[in-house]
Amino acid sequence: MSREIEKKWQKKWEEAKLFQSDCDEREKVFLTVAYPYPSGAMHIGHGRTYTVPDVYARFKRMQGKNVLFPMGWHVTGAPVIGIASRIKNKDPWTLELYEKVHQVNKEELSKLEDPEYIVKYFSNEYHQVMSDMGYSIDWRREFKTTDPSYQKFIEWQLRKLKEMGMVRKGNHPVKYCPNCDNPVGDHDLLDGEGVDVNELTMLKFEINGKYLIPATFRPETVYGVTNLWLNPDVEYIEVKNNGESWIISEKSFYNLSNQIKDLNIIGKIDPKEFIGKFVKNPITDKKHPIFPASFVDGEYGSGSVFSVPGHAPADYIALQDLKNNENLLSEYNLKETVANIKILNVVTLKKYSEIPAKDVIEKLGIKNQEDPKLIEATNELYKVEHSKGIMSPHIPNYGGKKVAIARDMIKDEMINNSLATIMYDFAEHPVVCRCGKRCVVKIMDNQWFLKYSDETWKEKTRECLNQENIIPNEVKSNFEYYIGWLKDWACSRRIGLGTRLPWDKQWLIEPLTDSTIYMSYYTIANYLKNINVQDINDAFFEKIFFNIDSNDLKVEKDIISSIQKEFSYWYPLDWRLSAKDLIGNHLSFHLFHHAAIFPKENWPQGMVVFGMGLLEGNKMSSSKGNVILLSDAIEKYGADVVRLFLMASAEPWQDFDWREKEVIGTKRRLDRLFEFVNKIEDIKGSPLDLSNIKKVNLSRKIDLWMINQLNIRIKDTTDALEGFQTRKALQDCLFLLKKDIDHYTYRVKHLLESDNVDNTNKNGEGKWDEAIVYVLSTVFKSWIRILAPFIPHSAEELWSSCGGEGYVVEAQWPTNIPLTYNSSQDSNLEEKYLSTEIIEKSEEIVQGIVHDILQIKKIIDKEHKKIHIYLASGWKWDLYKIAEDIGKPDIGQIMGKAIGQNIHDDKKEIADFAKKISREMTKTRYIGKIDEYEILNDGKDFIEEEVKTEIAIHKDNSYDPEDKAKNAIPYKPAIYME
RNA sequence: GCGGGGGUGCCCGAGCUGGUCAAAGGGGACAGGCUUAGGACCUGUUGGCACAGGCCUACCAGGGUUCGAAUCCCUGCUCCCGCACCA
């Protein structure tokens, strides 16, 4: 298969407009995949994502369905803004990424300084590669999310949600770079990728009308404070907030000033002057001394720490250090104060003492506050106290409550009484922006939120989920979890490409929010291209989607009605395909918004979730350069090989692994398909003509077997594809069917080779056995169609070269081929031989006999002049039936019944055989009595050929010199080798 | 931490509504065939022991249910993934 041939068919399909779908009388199938965000070149991971729906679309078309498979470009969002500016700034890492990995040539590279150009460039690239892959997309409906009419659609949607009360205003903390003056995502970071933002409570400890405001994860430990820590080597400042004076570290101001408005620096503070003084506990009013500590990080929180030595290992060990540090004690004159410190208990914990911090310190053998194991100790105690701790009984109001509950109650109480405030900080430092400056946590105010926390909305969304097919079913519980967990979603952004919030133009609509119900947009996108944007208004969408009339409608009536018709034909969406990692956001949002906006009858019907891609066992990643571009793969192997590999190596929801070696193997397998045609033509002695296969009545069991296998494979493949199991489908229709064909040709080889076959039939046409030609041609005709969704170009080429009618793309999906049996003896017997079970069992018996004989031959190394085969006598069948009815290998019960029914005279023989059958029955499937004599006679030529010895099949034991006949079991005749 | 999903033969990976499972398919390895001995292709072998079509040991570990478990239940160990303002 050359690329030229693939291109030839792509051109023909396009010219014939095969994939342009409009509403008609047929049943429809509408499926969409998440549209790509084109900020880089398409790699093989994307290839899998988009090939799955294409295969399914092609499969459904062949089943006679009207299939809509559209594509668009999600160009809204912030990443390209950063990329563009990095290219403009000649950032070497970015330049290399785009030049080497995304293979943008030098000339184009400089143009990528413009974010709009980036998405334009790569959406063109995507379009081209998708065409090269042969995707059956209706390109008339292609759009970008920045198209004016799409923006109208988004504005309408947001206004509608706002009217429904699903939008609110609020504040939100984000990772932020003060230098770039922008929020930053993980991909914008030089350092600190994946670092969490934590919420801390800052407690106000009063001292001389000013406040030290140590921040903590554990506000409930305020009851166990013994002292405060300041680091004498850190620089502190005084700041004013709402008339209050706070003392914080200079470094923490950088972060805090982004969270708390009107934070003004008053001046520097010398921490040494505070050491030894006393502060007032905001909740207990106790006085606590301030001590020096080196472990206090000026960059974290507000640069001071309150000490709870009973429950914080760091505090405990710092206190010990201080006690032993004569220099410090005398420098600040603290000896007496320190000696008077009494460690307090706050939380009761089973298996721990009154002072859990001490237990942990001793367990881990921590020596001083510089010990790196201190972090481990802190984490361990933090976890245990949070999950298992109970507030000790002496704590007022909260004693006996679980720590996890009391913590929030205490925090809220203090905040409500202005004794504390919330701040955010990174879990780890530093977090560095790509520009080189440190990031902070900034509180974005006047943000807009979608109220996913709304219980009524959640409930409706669950209802929407429950009426859907989810593939694979296991991820359904994931959806349930996420729907429950989702909080309000900040849906507005400062930067990026996108649509502005219609009622607050300073904000852009966030890209996950503008892609929730766009599937509906596809159904009408082709019409909107011919409508004046000014005429597209809310009234228009309300009319199209809900048939609500309005005076504001500006579009002509008949145009409206044809658009309406198109929408109501295609909607609801039958399948939504997307990646696994989007379950928690995009796919859930998709459910939320459909549930809110559309009536039940237009709720989506199904979702398929994709796994990830690996490259030779490693995670694929463009930014790390570990990818193969799809265009390169097509160039090297051809689109069909790439498609076939991607579909065969894993089910869509599993991770697939692109292994060069196996890709090459796939290519070879495809080549063999072409060779198969030559083989048939060779046997036939003339070119294959699929439109004109000569029907032949079959009389050999093996011919029936082959057709029967074909039917099984067709059914299994069809069932697998209905459930998007592309891998299983290919196992059945490519690998296993190939094996069947190999088996068949092997099985009939004596009919093709031997001289006693008449090379010409009575009409003088055809070279060999007509039945074989019929069987192989029939198999091939189905085979090529069933493979067409996977390897459309090759299938088309073979189809046309073998006389197939029209395009194979449009051919009918193969279905069951009825079996007819041409029995020479008795036409009434027909039915008896045509069940799948009997056909399969017949072949099993023949193969079993050959196998057993060969095995025996191997064991006893001597010449045989004849092999005798004895069949199980009637009473054995009766006994087998009895055993089967009983259903388990209960020898006593089997014998009892057998003797009761008097099936055989010799009771000892019954006993022996009952033992045998009870073992055998667990290994063999019972399908009723069959005519073994006929079956073996039919396969006699083959058996003799295989074992290279004459055989005799006996109906009775009149000739049985070594008394072997008694070994015969139903489905397993006895063998005597003479 | 919360939530989800796994652990199968040299490797990947099916099976997992209990018996037809020494376990599909692919890759690798080994042997043989073919051969312009280079690739490709074809056949066979790839847990152990037997040597009249058989037996034993096996599907993370341990326990249980059952006539019977890779498959069902419990316990332990262990691995992977998602946890947001980002597509």
Image (cartoon, rainbow, N blue to C red):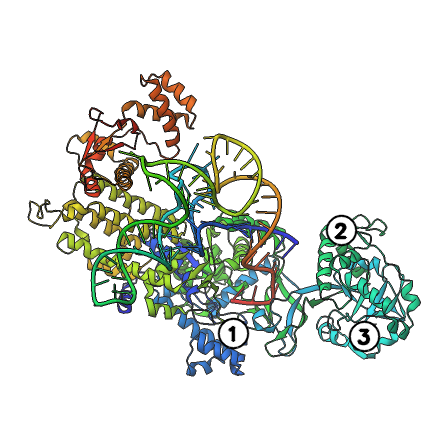
Q: Quick one: quadrant of the N terminus of chain A? A: bottom left
In this orientation, which residue lies closer to the viewer: A102 or A291? A291
Q: Measure the C-alpha gap from mark 2 to mark 3.
A: 37 Å
* Pointers 3 and 1 in contact (C-beta within 8 Å): no
Looking at the picture, does residue A585 appear above or below residue A976?
below
In the rendered structure, which amino acid carries the disc numbered 3? Answer: Lys
Neighbourhood count class around disc 3 (C-alpha, 10 Å): few under 14, some 14–19, many 20 upward: some
Neighbourhood count class around disc 2 (C-alpha, 10 Å): few under 14, some 14–19, many 20 upward: many
Residue A172 x/y as whole percent: 66, 66
In the rendered structure, which amino acid carries the disc numbered 1? Answer: Val
Seen at 39% across and 68% down, the residue is: A630
* Pointers 1 and 2 in contact (C-beta within 8 Å): no
Check disc 2 and report its element: helix, strand or loop. Answer: loop
Residue A910 x/y as whole percent: 35, 21
In the rendered structure, which amino acid carries the disc numbered 2? Answer: Gly
Q: Measure the C-alpha gap from mark 3 to mark 1.
A: 40 Å
Q: Is residue A162 left or right of residue A418?
A: left
Query: Are the residues flagged by discs 3 and 1 from a single subunit?
Result: yes
Q: Which residue is mark 2?
A: A389
Task: Give the mark, 3 or 1, whose residue is nearer the N terminus.
Answer: 1
Q: Which residue is mark 1?
A: A80
